Image: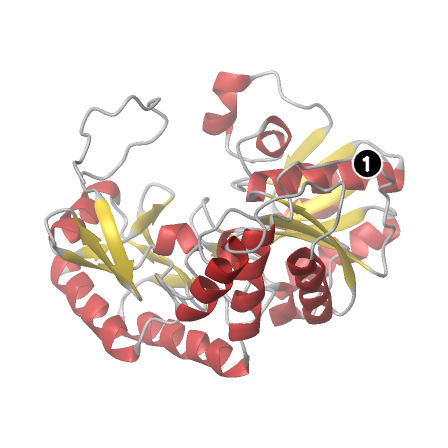
Amino acid sequence: MTVLTGAPLLPTYARFPVTFVDGEGSWLIDEDGKRYLDLIAGIAVVSLGHKHPAPLAAAKEQLDRLWHVSNLYSTLPMEHLAVRLSERFGGAHAFFCNSGTEAVEAALKWARKSTGKTGYVALEGSFHGRTMGALSITGQPGKQKPFLPLVPGVSFTTPDRLADAVNADTAAIILEPIQGEGGVHPLGREVLETARALADEFEAMLIFDEVQTGIGRTGAFYAWQNSGVKPDAITLAKGLANGLPIGALLVSDDSPTGFVPGDHASTFGGNPVSCAAANAVVDTIDDDLLAHVREIGALFQNELPNVRGRGLLLAVELGRPAGPVAHELLAKGLLVGTAGDTALRLTPSLTISHDEALQAIAILREVLA
């Protein structure tokens, strides 16, 4: 296949100078046949590795049956996925969409409908998406400024000042258990407990944005399970279908369902092929794989300096611009992301092997020396 170097794409991405044509496991292959060890995994999306046999077989089987019917009707893959996610949550109802930012938009509407209130409390440095509602609760002024004015009624605060921001008008407190795009900064258990207590006191909804932390990424199926602080709702996307587009809002059975028919919709949400792949992913992420995630995450943290995060959502703090270092690693066949301005982000597939992790660590040590 010919690589189109001047394809007519809008300039919304600063892409690395490489075009990939194939992948397997933790490896990607470019148009020249060069192999790269992938510590990005599509930005924490390809959770089981490229071409993992379980979601691959499930998607292929569903492609031979049914692609799309809309949400005027139900499909078995969607129903089965809702059951699986609910069981892992401890009882929840699901709304399916196509991406993380759509899941956040659904959560924002659900909170207003459920409480009759309009205010939101979010954290400085947070990232929740790029559609207008999700961008409005993203605590990064640089991302917001070109698109002002945004949705009103949002209060930004710091973890230690949550109590100053929540009041009787607050519909929802929305937090990332680990701030991903903002630099991979985990929130402590005490912060999450405070948020839970404030939500209960002011009859607000507590929403955890688990678009990046969910589906095994931190060594627990949902990141909230690490702390035991149960939210009213969570958003999911990235790793749920191993690369096929999907997003989800899960609302706890202990919280108001809020919505009635007509309140919200997604034409492609719950797509049978994406849901079939997601069912295979959920079935594959068992206790043994979660233990493996914790083990490999600890290996990176023990063998590299200045690492923060949990499981396989990690950042290596450089104290200098991370972009040039990511390009240097690319030249050596290692793919990493960036988090904030001065950190490398490591989000490999959950199935990365011990030997592959050691290969990555050796390259990182060489470049960072």
Residue 233 at what x, y percent from top left?
73, 53
Which one is nearer the viewer's eye here, 12 or 50? 50
Q: In the picture provided, is 199 more to the left or to the right than 85? A: right
Q: In the picture provided, is 11 more to the left or to the right than 207? A: left
Whether residue 365 is visible to the viewer of this picture, yes or no, is: yes
Give above or below for 97 relative to 77: above
Give above or below for 169 relative to 284: above
Near mark 1 (Cα within 10 A), the count class, few <14, some 14-19 or many ≥20, is some
Give above or below for 219 relative to 125: below
Q: In the picture provided, is 227 more to the left or to the right than 337? A: right
Residue 304 at what x, y percent from top left?
27, 68
Q: Quadrant of residue 122?
A: top right
Q: Which residue is mark 1?
A: 112
Q: Quadrant of the C terminus?
A: bottom left
Type of amino acid at the residue the image marks with label 1: Arg
Q: Quadrant of residue 350?
A: bottom left
Say which element carries label 1. helix
Q: Name the residue located 61 percent from the left edge and 44 percent from the top edge.
A: 68
